[in-house]
Structures are given as structure tokens and as C-alpha cells.
Image: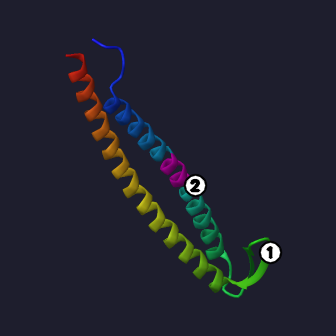
Amino acid sequence: MSSEIPPQVQNQLAQLQQVQQQAQALAMQKNQMESMKKESEMALEELEKLSDDAIVYRAVGDLQIQSNKDDTVAKLKERLETLSLRLQSITRQEERISKRFTQLQEQLKQAMGTQGQ
């Protein structure tokens, strides 16, 4: 039995590592999106407590812009919807990556099993 790893197995290992890195990147993106969504939900909750004629300020880049409650609530709801859609997309990507990871693991097991024989 040769101790050298066949090129096919090396390729599969490289693919497995790449898929693992993609999964880690997606997990980081998902955490970031969830954090942003939570912040927006908390801000919306606080805005709902204010009177309808309250003057609020919202961040636009480096500036704080005066706004009315209704406009700010609408923008926050739009942001929450966008974040929810992004999270759904990331979840679907995670599922695909997970399936691909499992598939590659099985291929590697088979390749290693046939190599040992």
C-alpha cells in the first residue's frame, strides 16, 4: 500500500476544505445579519413607544438627520424585510453547502476505502 495520496483524493480534500470555508463565511454573514435585524427590531420597538408627532433623528452615513416617526418606522420596516430576505437566502445557501459537504465526505470515505484495498 502506498502512503502517497492519489490526485483524485487530494482534489476531493481541497474541495471539502473549500466548502468548509464557504460554510464558515456564511455562518459569519448570518450572525451579522441576525445582529442587524435584532438592532432594527429593538429600534422599531422603541419608536412604537413614541407619540405620533415625535421628532426623531436617524443616521444617514455620518450624519444624524431629523425625521418624523412615520418615515423612520417605514424605513425600519423596509430594512427588517430586506434583512429577513437576506437571512432566508443565507439559510438556503447553508443548506446547499451542508449537502455538498456531506456528499464530499461520502466520496472521500469511498475513495479512502478503495485505496486501502
Q: Is residue 72 left or right of residue 9?
A: right
Which residue corresponds to the image point at 65% horizontal and 70% vertical from the top-left?
46
The range drawn in magenta is 25-32
Q: How busy is the neighbourhood of tag 2: few (under 14 within 10 Å), some, or many (20 plus)?
A: few
**Circle 2: element type:** helix
Q: Position of residue 6 (x, y in %)?
A: 33, 26
Q: Quadrant of residue 105?
A: top left
Query: Looking at the rendered structure, which numbered label has been put on residue 63?
Result: 1
Nearest to the observer: residue 52 or residue 5? 5
Which residue corresponds to the image point at 80% horizontal and 74% vertical from the top-left?
63
By secondary structure, the bulk of the magenta-drawn segment is best described as helix
Which residue corresponds to the image point at 27% horizontal and 11% vertical from the top-left?
1
Measure the alpha-carbon separation of dots 2 and 1: 23 Å
| Most distant residue in the top direction | 1
Q: Position of residue 40 (x, y in %)?
A: 60, 66
Query: Looking at the rendered structure, which numbered label has been put on residue 88?
Result: none
Q: Which residue is mark 2?
A: 32
Q: Is residue 75 above or below residue 53?
A: above
The reply to whether dot 2 and dot 1 touch (C-beta < 8 Å) is no
Which of marks 1 and 2 precedes in the sequence?
Answer: 2
Q: Is residue 94 left or right of residue 65?
A: left
